[in-house]
Amino acid sequence: MGISTKLGGPMGPHRIHGLASSLLLLAACSTVELPAPLPPPGSADSFGTPSDLRNAPTRQEVQENWWKPSIDLRWQWQLSETPVDLSLEADIYDIDAFDNDAGVVAALHAQGRRVICYLSVGSWEGWRPDKDRFPASVIGKEYEGWPGEKWLDVRQIETLAPIMRERFDLCRDKGFDGIEPDNMDGYTNDTGFPLTYEDQLRYNLWLAQEAHARGLSIGLKNDPDQVTDLVHDFDWALSEDCFVEGWCEDLTPFIQTGKPVLAVEYTDTGVELVKTCQEAKRLRFSLILKNREIDAWRRPCP
């Protein structure tokens, strides 16, 4: 579908480039079993088809004791200008996995907040502490407009799995309640790899399985074309610019199944907040207005 603009929406989820923390990744890789039977290690299909993943015994055996947010919650999203402003009235805080320690999460929990762990699952970021763990074979084209960031070959789950599992372990061990997985629609972008809808679907289902195996909630970030296939495997959705770009209706299956849609519109588009809030109320989306830098400033709907 052409070149990503990185301005939100289905063509390119927004990313913010903050300074990398020096925090080392915690915990060992998960030992959750993969769906059986499995082809030999290293084969292209060793992580199964989307159907295999959806019906994996490990998913059926895991107790569904992770946090499942309800509709109409208030939320805040801050990925830059740390430290995080803890003073805003919000039921949910969405903050960076690496740039915040367990103390920040604990402080938010003490205020009765739920806390979401932001990380990229579809791109290599040259400022992250685990950047050297990615082999050259999975790193693709530059993410246009974002120096130091490149797309990942999400077909190679076996190669990416240890890295992503450690990232999910990091979120769990810091006490986060859920995961916001960014850049999960690479198949619609010029990544340098011939990614297909099925490739992306398999990877996204695997991500949901890994999050739930750790007792973590997980949201579907943008990726509206796969909502029908993924709504039952993800616990909520997060949209960027869907009102200004006109694709919010694609996310309504989440609302119809009792799962919230956390929506953000940006100040640089000239969006009319009052009018957009009226539409968000009709759809029952939890809408906030943010600066594109995703700093602490936020304007929620009345």
Image (cartoon, grey):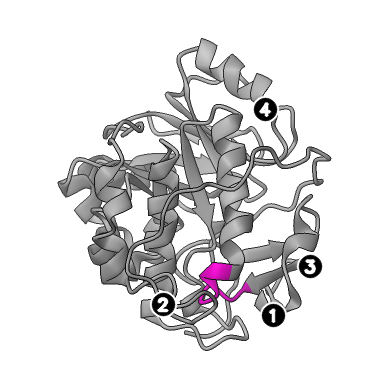
Q: Earlier in the sequence, mark 1 or mark 4?
A: 4
Q: Which residue is mark 3?
A: 147
Q: Which residue is mark 4?
A: 84
- x, y percent for residue 188: 47, 78
CA gap, disc 3 and disc 4:
24 Å
Mark 3, Cα crowd under 10 Å, few <14 / some 14-19 / many 20+, is: few
Mark 3 and mark 2 in contact? Answer it, CB < 8 Å: no
Whether residue 207 is in magenta: the answer is no
Circle number at residue 207: none
Give the residue type at disc 4: Val
What secondary structure is marked by label 1?
A: helix
Residue 233 appears in the picture as rendered = no
Please report the residue visible at 46 percent of the width from the left and 31 percent of the height from the top: 177
Circle number at residue 137: 1
Please report the residue visible at 53 percent of the width from the left and 46 percent of the height from the top: 30
Give the residue type at disc 3: Pro
Q: Earlier in the sequence, mark 3 or mark 1?
A: 1
Say whether residue 164 is left or right of residue 55: right
Mark 3 and mark 1 in contact? Answer it, CB < 8 Å: no
Point out the stretch of residues depicted in magenta: 152-158
Q: Earlier in the sequence, mark 3 or mark 4?
A: 4
Foreground mark, 4 or 2, reads 2
Circle number at residue 39: 2
CA gap, disc 1 and disc 4:
36 Å
144 shown above or below 275 = below
